[in-house]
């Protein structure tokens, strides 16, 4: 199986197991229909791009990470890109804590508040964000 196709399959499996929520910020993601996502969550065209589902290696390939199911999670484009733009990227668990603390302070993403993009009262993602 070609590497690119394998990554696509692993990304989709991860996204499905994560309920189509980003591994880091827990916001919903889209794979192939940005217009429907934009309409559903009342986002701008610019903001909707941040929520595209990407494959994220927990251990980067340059650090010996492999393209295997245990090493691939689904992350929104914004979180994936932001993690790897750092001079010294944090490990996945540390970055997730960092992102969630920034969300709690309203300092992450260009998107509206979590409530307006799917974290209604009782939503598991909202609970996770509040307890972490």
Image (spheres, helix red, strand yellow):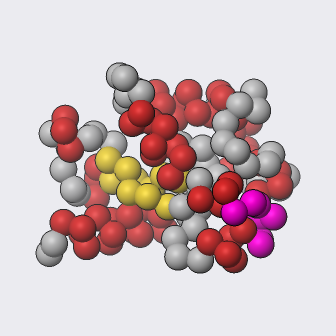
Q: Is residue 104 left or right of residue 59?
A: right
Name which residue lies at 55% across and 29% down.
97
Q: Is residue 37 left or right of residue 75?
A: right
The one of 47 and 10 positioned closer to us in this rendering: 47
**Rendering coords of residue 96 (x, y %):** 52, 35
Q: Is residue 123 left or right of residue 84?
A: right
Asked if residue 123 is among those painted magenta in the image, a careful observer would answer no
Instruction: Give the answer, above or below, for where 76 lies relative to 62.
Output: below
Q: Quadrant of the C terminus?
A: top right
Instruction: Give the answer, above or below, for where 86 lies relative to 38.
Output: above
Name which residue lies at 61% across and 49% down.
26
Q: Is residue 1 left or right of residue 99?
A: left
Q: Which residues are magenta?
A: 39-45
Q: Is residue 93 visible?
A: no
Name which residue lies at 41% across and 69% down.
12
Question: Which residue, as the protein is rendered here, is positioned at the far top?
Answer: 88
Q: How many marks?
A: 0
Q: Quadrant of the N terminus?
A: bottom left
**Rendering coords of residue 36 (x, y %):** 69, 77
**Rendering coords of residue 98 (x, y %):** 56, 27
Q: Is residue 32 visible?
A: yes
Name which residue lies at 52% across and 43% down.
79
């Amino acid at each position: 199986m070609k590497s690119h196709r394998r990554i696509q399959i692993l990304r989709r499996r991860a996204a499905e197991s994560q309920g189509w929520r980003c591994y880091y910020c827990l916001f919903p993601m889209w794979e192939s229909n940005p217009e429907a996502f934009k309409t559903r969550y009342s986002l701008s065209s610019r903001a909707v791009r941040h929520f595209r589902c990407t494959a994220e290696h927990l251990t980067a390939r340059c650090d010996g990470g492999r393209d295997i199911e245990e090493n691939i999670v689904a992350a929104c484009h914004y979180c994936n890109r932001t993690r790897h733009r750092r001079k010294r990227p944090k490990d996945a668990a540390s970055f997730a804590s960092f992102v969630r603390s920034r969300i709690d302070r309203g300092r992450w993403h260009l998107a509206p508040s979590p409530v307006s993009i799917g974290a209604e009262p009782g939503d598991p993602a909202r609970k996770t964000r509040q307890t972490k």
